[in-house]
């Protein structure tokens, strides 16, 4: 095995941003490309609907990451219920697992995809754990 | 895409979108496994990430393990619960006539499709300095349980392959060729699809 390459950053992402062709979003930048450039991994939220068991499974994964030195963010999109993040269901699941809610960023489909991309990139680069937490876990 | 058009859907192992889910020293990318994402998106596939069974069961700081160590009733029950959580989405895709494929992680004790890792005598103190497990041609535990859940729902076996990340020595170019051959074969088998990539 080679040295580990993980980026220690994870974004919760709506299905609508993982699969933007599902609903035309030509006025948004490609979010997966920006997340890759920022060194983020993705936890995909399901499309709108009832997904109680799946959201609980996702919350378990988020809790495991949050408790072991990973920086977490949530990127939603305007026009989807809860930004596509199932926040009304997911937030209580996270709280019950002792997880501080991830910082959220909302993408705004509009005329200027480049500006939206810059806004997202700035948000992504701002999400990080305190240095002492990084040193504790990332060895 | 026209509303109601038949889609291509790729179920992908959790760590293909999130390398942070890997065991320590197992991550070959910072986050996304971009060759897989690119190959699928360029062919018009909708991505559906599967849960990671090992992460929620044994934790982010788990030891490496082989198939036999995860082959326990409790781990299988955990995998079945996860399969029941994601199966309604998969069933929805299949029932509406979408073409659904599965991309696992070859060599993984859980997410292996063509191959998994085996060493029946592994156990006890984790002091194996050499990569002395064997690669054997069989599904990982999670894929076995997921396929069993889909079969219980009366769904057909999905065409499947694995990205060969956990085979001991990772060969990205070879893995990319394998995946593209698999996808090209699907395209030849099912036609060109009704939704070519932009």
Image (cartoon, helix red, strand yellow):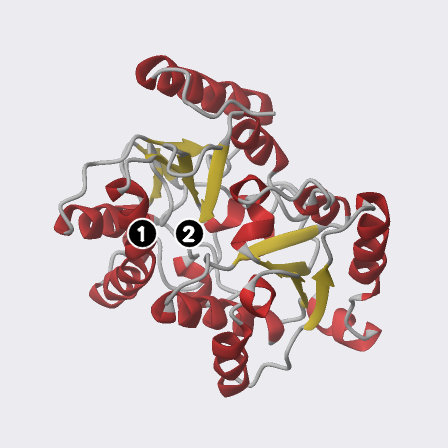
Secondary structure under tag 2 reads: loop
Sequence-wise first label, 2 or 1: 2
Residue A124 at what x, y percent from top left? 78, 59
Occupied quadrant, residue A51: bottom left
Q: CA distance from mark 2 to mark 1?
A: 10 Å
Q: Nearer the viewer, residue B79 or B138?
A: B79
Instruction: Give the residue number, with chain letter if any, for mark 1.
Output: B142
Tag 2 residue: B50
Residue A57 shows in the view:
yes
Secondary element type, mark 1? helix
**B70 and B145: which one is in front?**
B145
Asked if marks 2 and 1 touch (Cβ < 8 Å), the reply is yes
Horizontal side of B192 relative to A34 (left or right) equals left
Q: Which residue occupies 85% across, 58% down? A: A122
Q: Horizontal and vertical percent for residue A97? A: 50, 83
Can residue B120 be seen at all in this image of the molecule? no
Determine which quarter of the picture holds residue B42.
Answer: top right
Determine the residue positioned at 41% across, 72% down.
A56
């Amino acid at each position: 095995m080679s040295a580990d390459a993980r980026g220690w950053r994870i974004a919760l992402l709506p299905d609508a941003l993982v699969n933007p062709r599902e609903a035309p979003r030509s006025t948004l930048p490609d979010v997966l490309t920006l997340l890759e450039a920022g060194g983020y991994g993705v936890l995909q939220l399901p499309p709108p609907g009832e997904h109680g068991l799946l959201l609980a499974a996702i919350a378990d994964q988020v809790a495991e990451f949050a408790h072991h030195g990973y920086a977490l963010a949530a990127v939603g999109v305007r026009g989807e219920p809860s930004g596509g993040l199932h926040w009304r269901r997911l937030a209580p699941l996270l709280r019950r697992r002792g997880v501080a809610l991830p910082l959220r960023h909302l993408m705004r489909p509009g005329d200027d995809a480049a500006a939206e991309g810059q806004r997202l990139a700035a948000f992504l680069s701002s999400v990080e754990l305190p240095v002492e937490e990084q040193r504790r876990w990332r060895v | 895409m026209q509303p109601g058009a038949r889609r291509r859907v790729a179920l992908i192992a959790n760590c293909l979108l999130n390398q942070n889910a890997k065991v320590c020293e197992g991550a070959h990318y910072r986050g996304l496994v971009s060759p897989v994402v690119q190959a699928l998106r360029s062919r018009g596939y909708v991505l559906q990430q599967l849960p990671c069974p090992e992460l929620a069961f044994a934790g982010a700081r788990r030891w490496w393990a082989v198939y036999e160590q995860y082959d326990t009733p409790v781990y299988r029950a955990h995998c079945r619960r996860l399969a029941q959580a994601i199966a309604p989405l998969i069933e929805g895709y299949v029932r509406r006539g979408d073409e659904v494929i599965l991309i696992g992680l070859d060599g993984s004790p859980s997410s292996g499709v063509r191959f998994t890792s085996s060493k029946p005598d592994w156990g006890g103190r984790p002091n194996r300095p050499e990569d002395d497990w064997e690669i054997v041609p069989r599904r990982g535990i999670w894929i076995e349980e997921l396929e069993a859940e889909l079969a219980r729902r009366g769904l057909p076996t999905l065409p499947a392959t694995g990205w060969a990340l956990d085979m001991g020595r990772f060969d990205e170019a070879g893995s990319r060729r394998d995946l593209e051959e698999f996808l090209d074969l699907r395209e030849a088998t099912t036609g060109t699809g009704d939704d070519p990539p932009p």
